[in-house]
Amino acid sequence: NAGVTQTPKFQVLKTGQSMTLQCAQDMNHEYMSWYRQDPGMGLRLIHYSVGAGITDQGEVPNGYNVSRSTTEDFPLRLLSAAPSQTSVYFCASSPATGLANYGYTFGSGTRLTVV
Amino acid sequence: QKEVEQDPGPLSVPEGAIVSLNCTYSNSAFQYFMWYRQYSRKGPELLMYTYSSGNKEDGRFTAQVDKSSKYISLFIRDSQPSDSATYLCAWGPEAGKSTFGDGTTLTVKP
């Protein structure tokens, strides 16, 4: 199993450009989330989804959009990139039932630099 | 005040030492607690999860929750150089919305 796959692994954007970070999981997990990780600030939740067609905002949603048309895919869109969005982005998924539903499987991350 | 505060580290220990990693939390509604391990330039991986108070053991790792003092700990026995990583505590009252501590970086020296 591939688990959670994120693409691209690295990206450099110019201020004002838009792009989509891709995330796909093959574990049939209902829940998917996007986090950003900055030095000294841990993981902060951007957006999350509890199922296809359902999304909600996390702690730091401004400047980002998401949609969930299928169980497998949860893309993150940067609308107009800003240097403050330079970060490492992680996608994560978890099943909806059982104690394991509180534990994530993470992707390997996308390192984004906005210049 | 952050909902989860983690001892900042960094922490450096000799091989074979017992390591204690600690977090405090502020919300008494928290029930599920997790520990993740993150190697450099990799995604976090779930190490252990516990529910409510008590201990949970898995090999050299023991997770402990003390709800009366809102304190969670991860103990690593017989630490190995391969344990060198950043350890993140987290709580998850609702699937899809875990809150993480800032992480403690551990180095185990041979």
Image (cartoon, grey):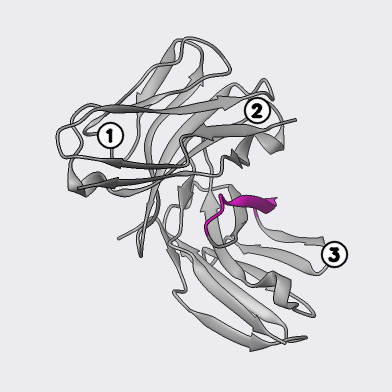
Q: Chain of mark 1?
A: A
Q: Quadrant of the C terminus of chain B?
A: bottom right
Q: In terms of depth relative to the viewer, which is nearer, B68 or A61?
A: A61
All told, the count of numbered labels is 3
Looking at the image, is mark 1 or mark 2 earlier in the sequence? 1
Q: Is residue B32 visible?
A: yes
Q: Chain of mark 3?
A: B
For disc 3, the marked residue is: B59
Q: Which of the numbered marks, if any, corresponds to residue B3? A: none
Q: Is residue A60 left or right of residue B49?
A: left
B87 with respect to B17 (left or right): left
> Are the residues flagged by discs 1 and 3 from a single subunit?
no
In the image, is residue B50 part of the stretch drawn in magenta? yes
Write down the residue under mark 1. A61
Q: Specify the segment rendered in magenta.
A: B41-52
Gap in angstroms between the C-alphas marked 3 and 2: 25 Å
Question: Between marks 1 and 3, how big is the CA–CA gap?
Answer: 39 Å
Amino acid type, label 3: Gly
- Residue A95 numbered mark, or none: 2
Q: Amino acid at mark 1?
A: Pro
Left-right relation of B24 to B66:
left
Q: Are marks 3 and 2 on the same chain?
A: no
Residue visible at 52% across and 48% down in the picture: B30
Secondary structure state at the residue bearing disc 3 = loop
Q: CA distance from mark 1 to mark 2?
A: 23 Å
x, y percent for residue B52: 64, 51
User: x%, y% of residue A20?
Assistant: 35, 26
- Give how far across and how far down residue A25 sits, in percent: 61, 26
- Where's the N terminus of chain B, which quadrant? bottom left
